């Protein structure tokens, strides 16, 4: 675990990501009203679309499991393999989305919160959290194509 203990998340935190998403109509799936709004959304998307460090993913998963669920003492190779399993599933996702998924899992909003999650459980929720990236990117692409005259299906 020494190799994964030094990893740090990026500067965006899950609560900050949610506030920014809530304040950006484009990240919520609305067509940009102006070139400036589309450019602003593009900058936000670039900021949010950062992949989590693999060492951080492994560290975060092992700490989450050990901190919230009973885990018998485990040998370092076992902890490393658990970290690798989680890293394989969560690679490519932003760390803020992974954090949001972990937070959601243990929240009152998750009826399965008493159960220990598998990597796919957290991955599924992290993809939901990160969907604002593809949603916003699609709206910006539409704006670049149609500008201030979008087809009716985009209004």
Image (cartoon, grey):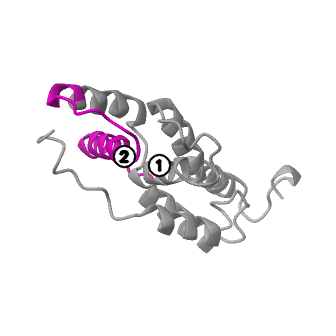
Which is nearer the eye, 25 or 137? 25
CA gap between label 2 and label 1 equals: 8 Å
Which is nearer the eye, 74 or 87? 74
Task: Work out whether 81 lies above or below 121.
Answer: above
Q: Are marks 2 and 1 in contact (CB under 8 Å)?
A: yes
The answer to if 84 sits in the magenta stretch is: no
Residue 66: x percent and y percent?
Answer: 32, 42
Which is nearer the eye, 61 or 116? 116
- Residue holding disc 1: 102
Q: Secondary structure at mark 2?
A: helix
Q: Secondary structure at mark 1?
A: helix
Q: Nearer the viewer, mark 2 or mark 1?
A: 2
Which is nearer the eye, 92 or 13? 13
Quadrant containing the C terminus in the rendered view: bottom right
Q: Residue 62 is drawn in which quadrant?
A: top left
- Residue holding disc 2: 64
The residue sitting at 27% across, 46% down in the picture is 56
Magenta residues, start to end: 49-78
Residue 28: x percent and y percent?
Answer: 68, 60
The residue sitting at 68% across, 72% down in the picture is 34
Residue 114: x percent and y percent?
Answer: 54, 41
């Amino acid at each position: 675990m020494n190799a994964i203990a030094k990893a740090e998340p990026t500067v965006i935190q899950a609560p900050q990501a949610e506030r920014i998403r809530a304040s950006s109509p484009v990240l919520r799936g609305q067509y940009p009203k102006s070139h400036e709004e589309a450019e602003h959304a593009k900058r936000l998307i670039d900021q949010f679309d950062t992949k989590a460090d693999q060492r951080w993913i492994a560290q975060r998963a092992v700490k989450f499991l050990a901190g919230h669920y009973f885990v018998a003492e485990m040998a370092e190779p076992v902890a490393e393999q658990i970290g690798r399993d989680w890293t394989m599933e969560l690679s490519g996702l932003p760390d803020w989305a992974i954090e949001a998924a972990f937070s959601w899992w243990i929240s009152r909003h998750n009826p399965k919160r008493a159960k220990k999650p598998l990597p796919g459980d957290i991955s599924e929720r992290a993809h939901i959290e990160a969907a604002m990236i593809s949603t916003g990117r699609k709206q910006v692409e539409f704006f670049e194509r149609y500008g201030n005259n979008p087809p009716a299906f985009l209004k």
